Image (cartoon, coloured by chain):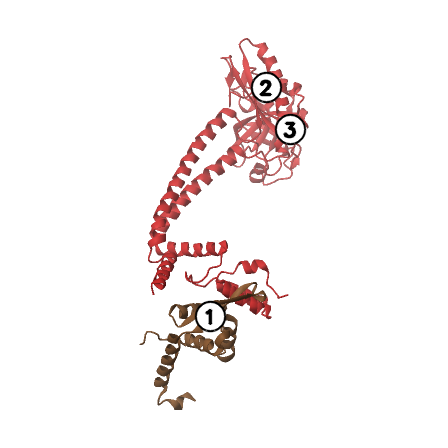
Amino acid sequence: MARKPPSWLVGLWRSSEAELGDALEEYAGGASLLWFIRQTIASFQRPIHSHVERRPIMISNVWRDLRYAMRGLRHNPGFSCAAILAIALGVGINTGIFSVLNGFLLREIDVPAAGELRSIHRILEGIPDRGVHGSATMVSTEEYRLFRDQAKTLSGLMAYAPFMEVTLDGERLQRINGDLVTCGYFRTLELQPALGSLFTEVNCSDEIESPVVVLSYDLWRNSFGADTAIVGRSVVLNRQSFRVVGVAPEGFRGIEFRPALYFAPITAQQLLRADATYREDPRMSWLQLVGRRRRGASDSAVRAELSVIEAQLDRRQAGRRSTILLGRATAFSMPRERGRILTVAGIVMAAFALVLLVACANVAKVMFPIYYSSPYGGRSRSLARSAASARS
Amino acid sequence: MPRDHLGEFEQIVLLAVLRLGDDAYGVPIRREISRRARRQITIGGLYTTLDRLESKGLLSSKAGDPTPERGGRSKRYFGITAAGLRALRNSRAALNAMWEGLEAYGS
């Protein structure tokens, strides 16, 4: 049995079968593996001779095509720059748009078992005096409580009002964005504090003497120097003193696309914005609902149950009609706005994909004549040489 | 300069083929060059020259039978043509003419 080098190494050989046969014979006769590898590498350097038999393997052609392409690019720098720029622009813009879309709209929320979280929206019709702060598909405080108390297909239901910008007193005043949240917010998301505790029912009661706040990890590190004694101390938001009960886990910045730096109970709404009475107003849509499916509960079961609860609300007010919308919880889950952005982004991406296609078609159109007629091209030179040898 | 001027390595390869006669294929050609001229060359390097000499009409080649130790691949046997022999003689004559009168430096 003749000694043979590994077949994958043999597969890399680039030049003719006779040369490979010589190399295998030498190897069988005792040449080292290192010698065979060096011969294989040297075979990459062999010029293309059309009259010499070629190895019928695809990788060899790919390698030659690559070398040919590099030669072509070197010899036509202006054209190469234009082609590369057009393709890079098309690919880059599409990738950029998709990255933004993915970051804002498509990615799941970064919490444990995020696949079980559902954004709950509702389309309301027939009630003209409805107030809206945020999106018309949000719910009022009273409606949230009804859903929370009656929904059995959800193991947890929470609500939050995003984008509550406040001033934070400190060495310098700064404006920070945060969320007003219900007590079940962190429990539904199954998050554990980095420091102190997250909200308990006591913190959310209307009768508490001093309001409380949970800081985001980023705010705690950047504005409070990661002070481990922060729990129990007070911070001033919109000139109101809030007692810090804990720090949210590292990396958690709320579930909207705009990072939340603090989390306060919804009971603090009027303290932070004295001119608004969102919380007490039964006709104010201002809370976004997010629920966690109970084990074994399907989306259709959740939707059916929530629709039954919603029907109770419809009966309380003449002319009120509503439809429940249930979707996987993602950042920026509001259905109408989301639909609009996805449509616009889809059109923009399709337009740039078309530009990319046109660029590729133009490059191909310009490349093909070069491929067959360029005085520099290796293929045409080989063709010319074989034609000459056929004549002689 | 005659059209069939040969480089040094081309002369070495042609002479090796001539010496080996009917057994002139890649492996013995490399061995002959290594043994006599003390030059280590890669297989690709040798075949580049062999292909060039063949395209000049100084060598001819034909495929032999495949063998197991070559992974079933045929040997490519080379033979010198009349033009190859003439080119070798011309090259030797040119060198001899240049050495004439300089024998003292050649030893």
* Chain coloured brown in the rendered structure: B
**Image quarter of residue A143:** top right
- Location of the C terminus of chain A by quadrant is bottom left
Q: From the image, state whether disc 2 or disc 1 is nearer to you.
A: 1
User: Does the rendering let one see residue A233?
Assistant: no
- Residue A77 position (above or below residue B47): above
Q: Amino acid at mark 1?
A: Leu
* Percent position of residue B45, x then y: 46, 69
Q: CA distance from mark 2 to mark 3?
A: 17 Å
Choose between A360 and B3: the one closer to the eye: B3
Question: How far is mark 3 from mark 1, CA to CA?
Answer: 75 Å
The N terminus of chain A lies in quadrant:
bottom right
Q: Chain of mark 3?
A: A
Q: Residue at the spot x=58%, y=29% of the render?
A: A329
Query: A85 left or right of B26?
Result: left
> Is circle 2 on the same chain as circle 3?
yes
**What residue would you read off at disc 1?**
B46
- Chain ID at mark 1: B
> In the image, A115: left or right of B58?
right
Question: SS at mark 3?
Answer: helix
| Pointer 2 with pointer 3, Cβ within 8 A | no
Q: Circle 3 is placed at which residue position?
A: A188
Q: Nearer the viewer, residue A40 or A238?
A: A40
Residue A283 at x, y percent in the picture: 54, 15
Q: Earlier in the sequence, mark 2 or mark 3?
A: 2
Figure quadrant of residue A112: top right
Query: Which mark, residue A141?
Result: 2
Residue B92 shown left or right of residue A189 in the figure:
left
Circle 3/circle 1 CB separation < 8 Å: no
